[in-house]
Amino acid sequence: MQLGVIGLGRMGQIVVQRTLDAGHDVVAFDLSAEATAAAEERGADSADSIADLVEALDDEKRIWLMVPAGDAVDATLDDLEPHLDADDVVVDGGNSHFEDSTRRAERLDAAYLDCGTSGGPAGAEHGFSLMVGGPEWAYDELTPVFDAVATGPDGHDRMGPAGSGHYVKMVHNGVEYALMQAYGEGFELLHEGRYDLDMESVARTWNNGAVIRSWLLELCEEAFREEGSSLGTVADEVRGGSTGTWTVQEALEQEVPVPLIYAALGERFGSRSPKEGRFSRRLANRLRYGFGRHEVARREE
Ligand SMILES: NC(=O)C1=CN([C@@H]2O[C@H](COP(=O)(O)OP(=O)(O)OC[C@H]3O[C@@H](n4cnc5c(N)ncnc54)[C@H](O)[C@@H]3O)[C@@H](O)[C@H]2O)C=CC1
Ligand SMILES: O=C(CO)[C@H](O)[C@H](O)COP(=O)(O)O
């Protein structure tokens, strides 16, 4: 099979490499000439533009987008659209909002597969987990590529119609937030608690046979090994947040309680409070004086 890959950053380069390793041909394009050259070094044919990429592809075009979610996907589809017809298939492997994917699937003549991708850059070696939404014929058509990019045939499946792949990935990320929060709280209690513990040793011990072993826990072990038991200079600030926000918005709309995911998202937002600290906590501090004449904790001027 021949695959066009657009977007050759951390994730797109892995799509290129694993597709080439499985014996397929790749034509690659990125706005960054450096990224395109890196794909060429891996063995892909490079393209200078989207028009150049579609020109290099066979009549039935199979194209994988791995660009940032949002405007970059729409801009890429604007450029692709005049070159596509109903026999072609476009895969969006990024973290797009599922409603954007449904809209894009309706707009395009080509078949559109929304593909939630999990595994991160570590997927280069073992492959990703792929959650795919869209028409069955297009999923079947792309199966050789999904087999290559995923961990294997069990590492991908069709979730349902347009939007369902990115819907499942959105919820996956909500779960990711809650698991990170749970590990974070457990290790914080151990770190602040009554024994002088080596966090790497705790994580390693848990990872060997404990009920709560997982890849995220292996990453905790790695973090303590590389940063130290107290996490050294790692700041109290968690970035990102879009997919977790979408999960909570959807849960509110469906009236499904997701208190753990919501709390984890709130903790992220809370970690980005201004330098003078959280306003709500400062007000609570002052209110205790108001109702109980409890001493007000004052900050340095
Ligand atoms: N990094 C991760 O662990 C994961 C990322 N994702 C998703 O995969 C997508 C890509 O992520 P990364 O590879 O990490 O991002 P990245 O920032 O490393 O790479 C994005 C690439 O897209 C290129 N690009 C941007 N706009 C473009 C356009 N209009 N045309 C052609 N190329 C364009 C950029 O030059 C860059 O090389 C995002 O939607 C991200 O949310 C999904 C799962 C895991
Ligand atoms: O999809 C992912 C992992 O599964 C990406 O790493 C994503 O960026 C994580 O979300 P956030 O940036 O909000 O932490």
Image: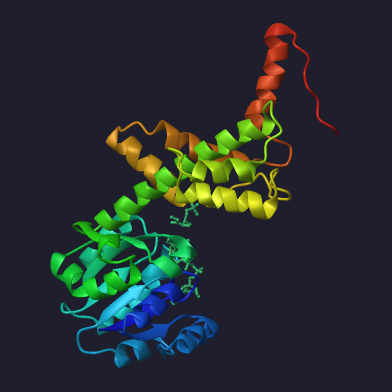
72 vs 86, left or right, is: right
Residue 264, image x, y percentages: 50, 38
Say which residue appears at 64% left-offset and 49% top-offset.
224
Tell me the quarter of the image containing the C terminus. Answer: top right
Q: Position of residue 81 (x, y in %)?
A: 28, 78
Q: Position of residue 69 (x, y in %)?
A: 42, 63
Image point (62%, 35%), residue name = 188
Residue 79 visible in the displayed image: no
Q: Residue furthest left?
A: 137
Q: Residue at x 68, y 41 (%)?
A: 274
* Location of residue 109 in the rendering, given as x and y in whole percent from the top left corner: 19, 74
* Tag count: 0
Please state which of residues 285 and 174 is positioned toward the viewer in this rendering: 174
Residue at the limit of the structure toward the top, as seen here: 292
Residue 164 visible, this angle: yes
The residue at the point 71 percent across, 33 percent down is 196
The N terminus sits in image quarter: bottom left
Q: Is residue 263 left or right of residue 112?
A: right
Q: How is the image coloured?
A: rainbow
Between 217 and 67, the one lying in front of the other is 217
Residue 247 found in image quarter: top left
Q: Is residue 224 left or right of residue 216?
A: right
